[in-house]
Amino acid sequence: MSHGPLTLPARLSLLAWDTAGPPSGGRPHPPGPARAGALVDLARRGLLTDQDGIATPADMDSRAGDAVLDGLLELVHESCPHSWRTWVTLRARVTADAVREQLVAGGYLRAEKRRVLGVFPSVEYALERAAAAKVLREETREVLLGPLPAAAVAERDAAVAVLADAADLLGARTDRRRVEELAERAGASVPGLARIVHEVRAAVAATVPVPAPL
């Protein structure tokens, strides 16, 4: 995928927008996928490590150089120890809001100021670069459903694909074996990362509402 400097949480947040619907989107965007992407991104960079199932900062002074990732890293530094699964949802809106502002700054989203009942100030967000979001969606679906062997997929792309699938952001009917292969591929170059990907993926999947029976 060729999406420049977009981090994993930024890509997952962008995938949450329905490019086939109205620009303002038709449903609230869940914070879990963005947080999961940030956790995996920090683990890929060696800034968060796994200590007996606990997400642990590797160094007190290291930084990612990205406002969203560094914000989460600081939150982990200042908080009690928690598992990877817990961090997927714990104060996840903080990360999701930071990613949204980052996408606004990058021109992917547009912030529109409004007044509720003509009095109370409010901000609504709309998809500005719909074409870029659509390309990202199509490329991610291709990773999940396409013929390219998992071993040939870029690790970052594999991570985005399995987390987007767990959050049901793409509406794709995927093969479980393929998803497992991609999850392993996502953590191929960093010891222990595959286990982290599996943990956060399971936590994201647990937040997806179960459809009501007909």
Image (cartoon, rainbow, N blue to C red):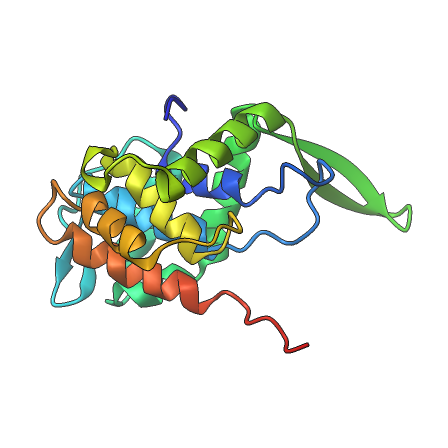
Direction front: furthest residue: 147
Residue found at x 53% / y 51%: 171
Q: Nearer the viewer, residue 23 or 161?
A: 161
Q: Quadrant of the C terminus?
A: bottom right
Locate residue 180, reporting x and y percent: 26, 55
Give percent across and percent down for residue 29.
58, 51
- Please state the horizontal and vertical placement of residue 140, each as a whole percent of the image: 42, 37
Tell which residue pokes out farthest to the left in this image: 191
Viewer-closest of 115 and 185: 185
**Where, by quadrant of the figure, is residue 125 drawn?**
top right
Q: Which residue does the image show at 12% across and 54% down from the upper left?
A: 192
**Image x and y of residue 30, in percent:** 54, 55
Which picture quadrant has residue 166? bottom left
**Residue at the (59%, 42%) spot, across then down:** 17
Choose between 24 and 162: the one closer to the eye. 162
Task: Answer yes or no: is residue 163 visible.
Answer: yes
Quarter containing the N terminus: top left
Depth check, front residue: 18 or 60: 18
Q: Is residue 171 left or right of residue 110?
A: left
Q: Is residue 28 above or below residue 66?
A: below
State the residue lying farthest toward the bottom.
213
